[in-house]
Amino acid sequence: CVRLYLDYLTMKENLGFDMENTIYQFPRDLRDAHAKAVAEKNSNDLADKIAIAERKYKNICKRFEKAKKIYTYEAEGLFIRPAKNAGEIVKEGRALHHCVGGENYLTAHNEGKDIILFLRMKQEPDKPYVTVELAPNGQIRQWYGKCDRKTNAKVNDKWLKEYIKTLNKAAVSREMNAQRKKGEKVG
C-alpha cells in the first residue's frame, strides 16, 4: 500500500499537479486514483512518442499517397491500407500490444525496407485489428493481431494470400504499362 501511494504521489507530481492540495495528497480511493494517474502518464508518454516519431520518420508520411494507391485493397468485409504516418504506427503497436511501433519497424518502413499495413474490418475502419509487415518484393514477413496472436488465423491467412495475389497481378500490370510507355518489349 505504501509503495502504491508513493508511486501515485510521484506520478501526480511529475504530471504537474499541485501536491500541496490535499485532494491530490489524500485521494479517497487510492487504487482508483493510482490507475487514473497511470492512464494519464501513459497518454502523455504516447503523445510524446508520437511527436518524436513524426519528426524523425518523415518519409512515411511523404510516401503515403503513392503507397495508398498500390497497397490498398478491399474484399469480404476486410480492407488493408498502408500506415499514413509514423504516429499511426506507434498507436497501432500500443493498441494491439505488439512491437510494430518500435524503432526497428519505424526505421524499416521509413527507409522503404518494408511497409507496414493495417488490416481492418470494413465496419470498424479505425479500430486496429491486424498489422502486416510486407517486404519490398511483395512477400508477407509477418502479421499479428492483439498481443502477437494470429487473430482469426485461417480466415486472415487465406485473405492475405488473396491480397498478395492481387498485389502481384497489379505490380505486373504496372510494369507492363511502364514498359509499353517506354516502347520496350513486354515479357
Image (cartoon, rainbow, N blue to C red):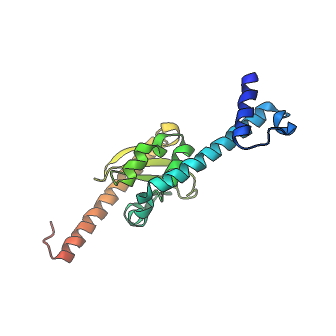
Residue sticking out furthest to the left: 185
Q: Is residue 67 above or below residue 3?
A: below
Q: Quadrant of residue 171?
A: bottom left
Q: Say above or below: 170 vs 135.
A: below
Give the residue at x 58% y 49%.
48
Residue 129 as seen in the image, left or right of residue 161: right
Q: Residue 134, image x and y in percent?
A: 36, 50
Residue furthest to the top: 2
Relative to 20, say whether 69 is above or below: below
Q: Is residue 2 above or below residue 111?
A: above
Q: Nearer the viewer, residue 141 or 9?
A: 9
Total numbered labels placed on residues in the image: 0
Residue 144 in sight from this viewpoint: no
Query: In which quadrant will I find the N terminus?
Result: top right
Residue 130 in the image: state x and y as whole percent: 48, 47
Q: Position of residue 40 (x, y in %)?
A: 69, 43
- Which quadrant of the view contains residue 168? bottom left
Q: Nearer the viewer, residue 56 or 174?
A: 56
Name the residue nearer the viewer: 44 or 19.
19
Q: Is residue 56 left or right of residue 183?
A: right
| Residue drawn at 53 percent across, 58 percent down | 122
**Quadrant where the C terminus is found in the figure:** bottom left
- Residue placed at 22% from the left, 69% from the top? 176
Is residue 105 left or right of 7 when viewed as pictured? left
Q: Which of the two residues, 26 or 187, is positioned nearer the viewer here?
A: 26
Left-right relation of 160 to 86: left
Q: What x and y, as percent, mark residue 183?
A: 15, 76
- The residue at 25%/63% (across/down) is 172
Q: Is residue 181 visible?
A: yes
